Image (cartoon, rainbow, N blue to C red):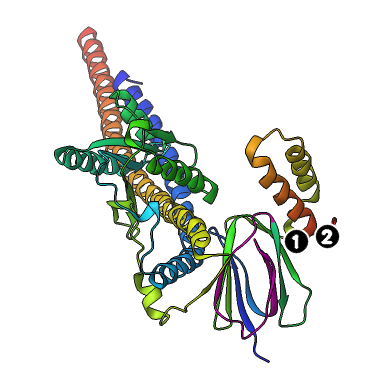
Amino acid sequence: MAKLKVGLVSPEREVWAGEADQVIAKTIEGSMGILPGHAPVLGVLVDGSVVRIKPADGGDWIVAAIGSGFFSVAGDEVSVLVEQVELSDEIDVNAARAALEQAMSGSEGDDSAVAERRARARLLAAGVED
Amino acid sequence: MGAQLRQLRRQIRSVKSTAKITRAQELIATSRIVKAQERVKASKPYARQITRALSALISHRSGVDHPLLNEQPDARRSAVLVITSDRGFCGGYNANAIREAESLVKALTEKGRVAVPYLVGNKGGIWYRFRNRQIGADWSGFSDRPTFADAERIGRRLVADFLKEDADGGVGEIHVVYTEFVSMLTQQAVVHRLLPLEVEDGPAVAESGPLPSYDFEPSAEAALDLLLPNYIESRIYHMLLQSAASEHASRRRAMKSATDNANDLVASYTRQANQARQAEITQEISEIVGGANALADASAGSE
C-alpha cells in the first residue's frame, strides 16, 4: 500500500516528518481523514484543534495541538503548516490547565475564545481530557 | 619608578582589559552566527511550502481579488519598516540600514509620498526619536533572537495599517529595509516591497513541477484570507532572521578589529615602557658612576 509523505511544519522548525498511513485533521466543516491516494486539497485548519498522524512504521499515533494554519494534500504528500504547534509529549499539562482557566475567566477579551480552544486542544492532545 | 613608566603600565593594563572584553564579545557573536544560520535553515521548509500553496491558489484562480494584493493608487503614505539591532558594538550594521532607509525615504518624498517609519530594534528607535521624526510604530527586545511570534506581531500591525485609509493613519504600501546575510564577510542592506504583495515563485516552485489543482476546504476565499497574512508574517520572519544573522556577523567583525587594535596598542605601549625603563636604568647607572667618580676624586685630592 502506498504511503503518505507527511511534514508537520511550523515557521521555526520542522516538527515531524516521515511516512504515514493516515492523517486526521479538523477543518471548519468537520474532521477529515486523509489516506494515500487522496485528491489534491488545501484546507484551513480550525484554530485550536488536534492533528493526528499514524506513522507508517506502526508506532503510536503522533498527536499535536495546533493554532492557526492549513494543510495541503497533493500526490500523497501532506504538508501541515501551522503557526503554533506542540506535540503531545511536549505539552506541559499544568500550564495548559492554567491557560484554560485564564481563558475561561474571560480576562483576555475577544481572544479568549481562541485561547480557550487552544488550551483545550493542548489538553486533548496530551490525553488528559476528551 | 618614574612617572612616565607608571603611566604607560596603567595604559597597558586598561587596554588589555578592553581587549579581553572585545575578544569575549567576538567569541559570543561567532557562536551566535551559527545558531542564527541554523534558524534560517529551520525556517525554510515552512517558507517553501507556504509560497507553493499560495502560488497554487493564485494561479488557480485567475481573477483573484484580495485587498492585500491590490495597489492603492490614491494613498499618499508609505510605511518603511527598518530593521536595526537593539545593541551597539556592531560596526556599520545600523548605520548602513538607516542610510538605506533614508535614501528610500528621499526617493519616496521625491515621488510626492509621505514616508512613515516603522522600526524594529532599539538603535533605530533612538535614531529617529533623536531627530523628532514621526514614528508609525516600533518594536524592540528581540533583534538578536527573533521568534515567529515577533514577526506575527509586526505583520498584524502592518496589515491592519495597510487596510486603513490614509486619513485614519493607514498606508498605501509597505517597504522593508533589512540586512541580507550574504556570507560571513558580506552583509548587504536591501530594500524590499512587502505590500501590495507580489508572491515570489523562486526556484523552489519551478523545480517541483506543475502545481496541483487543489480543492479548497471550506473555500478558496477562506484559504486566501488565512494564507496571505501568514505568508506576509513568514516573509517578515525571514527578514528578521537574516538581519539577526547579519547583526552577529557585523558584531563579530567589529569586535575582531577592536581586539586586533587593542593588541597592537599593547605592543606599542610595551615597547615604549621598555624604553622608558631602560632609560631609567641607564640614568641610574650613570648617576652611580658619576657619584663614585666624584667620591674617588674627592678622596684622591685629600691624600
What's the mark number on residue B65? none
A23 displayed left or right of B42: right
Tally of numbered tags:
2
Q: Secondary structure at mark 1?
A: helix
Describe residue B292's horizontal placement relative to residue A115 as left or right: left
The C terminus of chain B sits in image quarter: top left
Q: Which residues are magenta?
A: A21-48
- Furthest-bottom residue in this view: A1
Q: Residue at x 37, y 32 (%)?
A: B168
Q: Quadrant of residue A77?
A: bottom right
Quadrant for the N terminus of chain B, please. top left
Q: Amino acid at mark 2?
A: Gly
Label 1: how many Cα within 10 Å (few below 14, some 14–19, many 20+): many
Residue under the point 70% across and 32% down: A107
Foreground: disc 1 or disc 2:
2
Q: Is residue B239 visible?
A: yes
**N-term mark: 1 or 2:** 1
- Secondary structure type for disc 2: loop
Residue reaching furthest top? B302
Task: Give the label on residue A88, or none.
Answer: 1
Chain of the residue under label 2: A
Separation of disc 1 and disc 2 at Cα? 8 Å
Disc sitting over residue A127 in the figure: 2
Q: Position of residue A11 (x, y in %)?
A: 53, 59
Relative to the observer, which residue lies in front, A35 or A94?
Answer: A35
Q: Nearer the viewer, residue A53 or A41?
A: A41
Position in image of residue B301 (x %, y %): 20, 10
Circles 1 and 2: CB distance less than 8 Å?
Answer: yes
At 17% from the left and 42% from the top, the residue drawn is B107
